[in-house]
Image: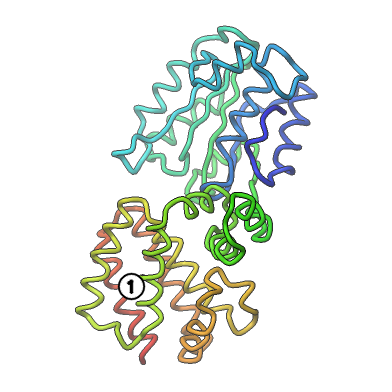
Amino acid sequence: MKGDSITGQQEARKLVQGQLEQDRLSHAYLFLGRRGLGKEALAVDLARSALCSCQGEEECSCICCRKIDHGNHPDLRIFRCPDNRRELGIDIIREMQRRLAFRPYEGQRRFFIVTGADRMTRQAANSLLKTLESPPDYATLILLAEEEELLLPTILSRCQKVRLKPIPRRKIAADLKDLGLTQERASLIAGLSGGSPGRAHQLAEDESLLERRKEILDFLSRPEELNYFNIFYRTKEWLDWYKEGFPLADLLMDWQRDIMIVKQTGPESLSNFDYDQKIRRIRQRLSAGQAVQALELAAGTVQDLENNVRSDLALQVFMTKLKKLYTG
């Protein structure tokens, strides 16, 4: 396959490349993995390899590849949820279906990429299902998703799953060092990235992300400050950051997961390894059951945040319950 835009996803690349070389592409794929692992890049590289007019050349500047680079190849379409909406609606799926009715313009196949497929409304998912049940033979649909369980089982059964795996922390840290970061900073960001090179680069480029992360973890690591006034004030600010794109949900989950596992592992296995001692002090306050309960509370709160279910109240309730667990 053409393109080298995906870090550390050789297994996924090998799978789709083998099918491409044998001319056995599936009519529908589901690329699964957390944000920043390269799902869209892999999908575009697959389309590029199939549509390129200079087959076999790794570095190519043919008219087809240039059109893909500029986003105007008629046989490759990418459909996204608009920035001002949290769900992918039926209007987007219907627009894809309208375009799907036309045969290829330049190549032998057409490729349709749907990002955020796990954010489809029920109506959109049911409409997409009809297309997956009887797709045209010249089309390949590629759905990109983070959460497999949010998709209809009937959609899952009609797609070939390709899982993109988190990249090892050492690999991400080494890549960041090559960009000029110090060993300490590269290791810290690699630990926060959750195995996502895209997220790691975002953290490296935006100083405010690490500053905000420090402010949140400093607060969480001081149970004596978890009073109702501070909880109300802090959560309001955190939600403002969340709306701006700060990975609050990931941070809350990673923090509680670190607390749950810290007795069985060393600092190198913690996402927030620079808070190792503070995490251990909090863990000493909790029983094993309480540590699990705290993680379950975080998971429920994250789901409420992502579904926009009274985010302010959900976060305040979570912090209030966390206070009771931390302080007894």
In which quadrant of the rendered view does residue 264 lie? bottom right
- The kind of residue tagged 1 is Phe
Front one among 301 and 207: 207
Image coords of residue 193 (percent x, y): 54, 58
Residue sitting at x 41%, y 39%: 120
Residue sitting at x 58%, y 46%: 37
Image coords of residue 300 (percent x, y): 40, 65
Image coords of residue 122 (percent x, y): 39, 40
Image coords of residue 210 (percent x, y): 43, 62
| Number of numbered callouts drawn | 1
Front one among 202 and 32: 202
Assign a secondary structure to mark 1: helix
Label 1 Cα neighbours within 10 Å, binned few <14 / some 14-19 / many ≥20: some
Residue under label 1, please give it: 318
Quarter of the picture containing the C terminus is bottom left
Residue sitting at x 30%, y 52%: 243
Quarter of the picture containing the N terminus is top right
